[in-house]
Image (cartoon, coloured by chain):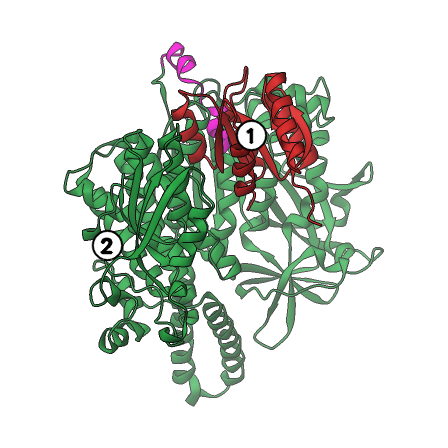
Chain colours: A green, B red
Amino acid sequence: MDYKEYLPVFIEESKENIQVMTDSLMRLEQQEDREAINELFRATHTLKGMSATMGYAVISDLAHELENYLHQIRSQELDLTPQLISIFFQAVDEIDRQIKALEETGSCRTRELSWLESLCGPGETSASLEPIPIEPPPEIEPEKLADSEIEDFFRVTLRLSNDCMLRAARLLTIYRQLARLGEMVDPQPTLDDIVSSRVGDTFTCIINCRSVEIQDALNNCMEIEEYQVTRAQAKGNLGDLAEPEPGLTQSHESPGEPIVAAGYKGKTSPSVRVDTEKLDHLLNLVSELVINKTTIQQAASGYSGLADGVEHLHRLTGDLQTIVMKMRMIPVETVFNRFPRMVRDIARSLNKQVSLSIAGAETELDRTIIEDIVDPLLHILRNAIDHGIEAPEMRKKRDKSPQGQITLKAYQTGNQVVIEISDDGEGLAFPKIRQQAVAAGLIAHNAELSERDLAGLIFATGLSTSDNVSDISGRGVGLDVARRAIEAMGGSIQVVSRRQQGTTFRILLPLTLAIIQGLLVECAGEIYVFPLSYIRETEVVYRRDLQVVGHQEIVVFRGRVLPVLRLSQIVTSPGQPVNDEMSMVILRHGDREVGILVDDLLGQQEIVIKNVSWGSDFFRSFLGATIMGDGRVVLILDVNTLLAPFREKEGGLVG
Amino acid sequence: MFRKKRILIVDDATFMRMMIRDILTKNNFEVVGEAANGEEAIAKYKEFKPDLVTLDITMPGMDGVTVLKKLREHDPSARVVMCSAMGQQAMVVEAIQYGARDFINKPFHPQKVVDTLRKALQ
């Protein structure tokens, strides 16, 4: 029986369940919450069932242990202490690591003996041992194997030697040796007893493994006077597990069924999981169709009989495109979900009190953007806790609540999605940023900069790569990396900060990367596209308006000096004749504006970005290409690259 | 001929280190280093990468359990046998939960020390 083809689904759903478990634990940490316990229990149970079906005993065993504890908590036999929650967190982390290992290597990590063993014990009773048919019945006929080689339930009974002094410690080493052989049932004394030294000189348990393994393990333990290993149950009882009846085996072997059962959540609308590659492929096909439709539209313009049909085609392809785009959108919730846990852990490690509130988690973004936004967000959140939020004592001194507040908010405006991260902490340390920026040669020592200009400097490369930046009690560590990642997605980042009142980072992201509004321009006989989102305005300029300052061509535009670039010099070769009358596209990126001179403006159009793997450096200035209705391939300009030379001079220009 | 197993001895008391060294060298182990405190232990572990560490629980500064945690952080497969005195059961239990292979009791019984180490090395 091979479940390999279900592995991606299994991993995906396991992650969802791990998320549910983490969320519930976070809630339980705040207050007693029956519903959270129930959710935790359900997710754990689902995970156990799925992993057992897939044959990942390492995961199902752990989930099983966890479930036993939760069962006792639900029936109020056990109190949910903070220590227990902490153990649960660690167990969830371990499951998470196993799933990640599965995802990366295709197999689980071998379980290390560690704190995990502390999970075994009181939860384990023979009554709670549910049949988990993990292993398929062995193909080889059992009779042909030596008895000691057959896996079964064995009762182990042992007595410590008389001169054993630290009995609890000794029993613990034995317990651990045995526990890693297989599932242990009904240990006497239990792990809790051992850890709290309630022990005599004997130990007994039932364990599911091969008897030869038990002998090896016990022979390798110190201070055992004698031991016995006997088969625990007559066949027909527990023995059934090892040799399921044909009917039972059948139901476990139908591969579709357990997965469907595990995937059913009861409250969500019916959905189908689709491989993202298929979605990408679909988008590609639809964009080809859109291009093709434009060709047909143009060709049919002379034939009145085709008008209705073409109009219908136009509407259908439009709808189709919208739906495909929507299919690629996922709520930011999928990444925001991870942050409460992370914030909790970081705050704890720094001895700070932080509460994270999230708004607008349902806001949707293209999945490729969502994947890339995680790291920058993490970075900013980490900075906010580390440098932004003050220690509780300091906060009290400033008449703030000892618990710092971080707000993560997402919302859509027009064609953009905004993500804001605000804290009510220290605020940026402007004098220190200034000092660092001067030291890094970013600004002149006497430069007059507003706080807003200074705040912008925290994203500058020079400032953040310096080693002693962590001395800045404000921010600045690696923010340039976050900035570049965001800009690479076609987004931008700004920061606003008020001393001792807090800092807000605002990230603007395009809704989707695949289809953008573009401005078509002509230059040296070729057509190029500018992404519309960067364009501030367009203007006609004349040759006489151009001036040269230093080595830079500029134009005075509405009383301000605007550096200009000639597109012809970027895309073809320098020294092209210059027309008397030219069009200028004014690009804006962050606080920087640059005019780009082109021969003519052709119009605005929705374009589908096709990624192209460029071989040559020349193409660095391009984001990709698109295919026009007439089949022509047109290059899309990369504004980030175009403006890069101006950005590096930023400090100098300001100063 | 099997390679001799390489051992690092960690104990703040010089005579305890000498005693363990004597027991081990007489029984075909190679003592690659000795450390008198936690910092030294971690540095020498990184330097010598021994097959096994004997680690005293009670030491000034970093205690044995803390050293154990750090060693296991650095190398999750580190084999450590704790050395304890009477009345330290809780510490030994904690150490085992953090991954110590086994423990030996003071006063040391040479044969027991050797047996424990041999088994811990399997």
Q: Residue at x 38, y 37 (%)?
A: A172
Q: Which residue lies furthest to the top in this view?
A: A397
Q: Which residue is drawn at 49% across and 44% down?
A: A508
Q: Which residues fall within the magenta stretch?
A: A382-399
Please tell me the numbered disc located at residue A129.
2
From the viewer's perspective, tell me whether residue A23 is left or right of residue A325: left
How many other residues sit within 10 Å of disc 1, few (<14), some (14-19) or many (≥20)? some
Residue A265 inside the magenta-drawn segment: no
- Type of the residue with mark 1: Pro
Secondary structure of the residue carrying tag 1 is: helix
Does residue A461 sit above or below A626 in this rendering?
above
- Type of the residue with mark 2: Leu
Separation of marks 1 and 2 at Cα, in angstroms: 44 Å
Q: The N terminus of chain A lies in which quarter of the figure?
A: bottom left
**Foreground: A189 or A583?**
A189
Residue under disc 1 on the same chain as residue under disc 2 = no
Q: Position of residue A318 (x, y in %)?
A: 41, 71
From the viewer's perspective, tell me whether residue A261 is left or right of residue B111: left
Q: Position of residue A518 (x, y in %)?
A: 56, 59
Q: Which residue is drawn at 76% across and 57% down?
A: A617
Instruction: Tell which subunit mark 1 falls on.
Output: B
Instruction: Tell which subunit mark 2 falls on.
Output: A
Residue at the spot of label 1: B110
